[in-house]
Image: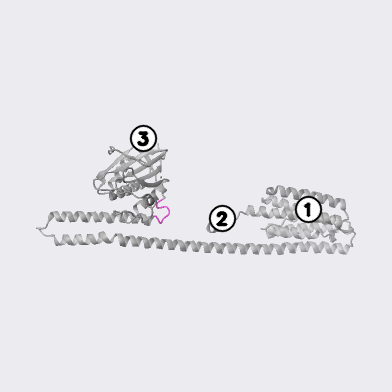
Amino acid sequence: MPSPSLAVGRLSLPGCGRPAGGLQYLAVRDIVGPAPSPEWDREEVERVIALIRFLIVVSVAGLQLFGTRDVRPYPVALWVVVGVAVTYSLFVAARLRLFLNPIGRWILTGTDAVLSLLAVAFSGGARSPALAILILAVSSWAMRFDLVLALLAAALDGSVLAVVILTVPEPDLGQAERLQAAVWWPCYLLFGALLTGILSRVERTEHTRAVVAQAGAAQEREHRERLEGLERQRQELLQVITHEFRTPVASLQALTQHLAWSATPEGDRVGRGKTLGLIKTHADHLAAMVDALHEVAGSRDPDALSRVQLSDVFLGDLLEQAVSAAGPGSSRVCIRVDPGIDIVRVDPPKVRRIVTNLVENALRHSDEDSPVEVVAQRGDGRLELLVLDRGPGLPPQQASLAFDKFAGFGERRGTSGLGLWIVDQLSTSLGGWVEAGPREGAGLQVRVVLPLRSRTT
């Protein structure tokens, strides 16, 4: 019978000391999103086909019951064919997944062809209404398989059909009528396979072109959105540069001019020393902003912040380096490392940058006589780094926004609002996270949680 197929805790420390030292379709799918599963489509279609197959069998049974004598010359044989076809169609409907692979489809096609030919042979041969079943079968082959294979299958089926027409005794037909039918029907099977195969190929070609065109449009739209996003980032960076650099640059200009006016032998050496100190402070300020902006620019590369290079380091030494890099005020930072985690396997530059940014933030927001604490401790297979200050802290509703890009809070906000954002990006790239919350007794606690990986041997 025919088988047509469409194709974040609190912590209080009393004190601490520093420690000693099909390729095209895959590409299209990646651009426009996942397409429906071909297997799923085929299964749904084959379920419809199974129903049609069963209805065709019922129609042949009706032909046997109500047809004229000319179309049921072999009633017993035809009832056997109908019984086999009913069993076959019900089995296929119940176990359809067995026939969704290429071999299974060939089994369906071959079985449909054999049963269709037998139905023709036992229901009137050249005059059998079941000849229409063969047209449906051939059309399904052309849609299911390659055109060449469909033509070969139609030629083979037509040849067998011609033999059936010429040799089946009943009904008793003239030789001319048999010859005419033996030529006529095989030719039309080939024509049906050819026409259906060409139309199916055209439909698949047009579908492919439409999908590729859709993919190209989606790719162009994605590229345009990416460029627009980069342009917005560029504008944001320019705004940061023009806003944040204005004050230190103007101060440097005024201070250097003051030095030029006071560059005399009787000049005030104490005043010049103070001026030079201010110049250095502003220069450090600018250098810190350049570093931050450099990291933001680098983050446009998807691998810039996510690339991780692990190595074994002494955690106490690493924290000492990170605190020292925080600049003026680092002498009031105390470090505490819990026993048992002296050597850790981390990405040293990233961890150093995380701690430096957090210490800079803590020093900026706390008074000059207020200590800042850096604590490293183990917790449930993880490394926890805490930076605690006695500054004004953050209200709960602002704590979740502290790590947004360009975010800044309080009267002593940072240079560009990038430091904590960078901490968040680096923590995420290391497989961890960062959170901020109020410290018991006033102040802010920032907690970074990182995976505690095994050390190399």
Q: For this view, does 267 lie left or right of residue 133? A: left
Residue at (69, 47) in percent of width and height: 98
Residue 402, horizontal then vertical, whole percent: 37, 52
- Quarter of the rendering containing residue 418: bottom left
Residue 397, horizontal then vertical, whole percent: 38, 51
Q: For this view, does 249 lie left or right of residue 342? A: left
Q: Which residues are magenta?
A: 299-305
Q: Nearer the viewer, residue 404 or 306?
A: 404
Asked whether the beta carbons under mark 3 and mark 1 sit within 8 Å of each other, the answer is no
Residue 303 forms part of the magenta stretch: yes
Q: For this view, does 249 lie left or right of residue 133? A: left
- Mark 3 secondary-structure assignment: loop
Residue 113 forms part of the magenta stretch: no
Residue 153, horizontal then vertical, whole percent: 73, 57
Q: Which circle, 2 or 1, is nearer the viewer?
A: 2
Main SS of residues in magenta: loop
Asked whether the beta carbons under mark 2 and mark 1 sit within 8 Å of each other, the answer is no
Mark 1 lies on residue: 114
**What's the distance in space between the residues labelled 2 and 3, CA to CA?**
49 Å
Q: What label does residue 178 carry, if any? A: none
362 up-or-down from 27: above or below: above
Residue at (90, 59) in percent of width and height: 172
Residue at (86, 62) in percent of width and height: 178
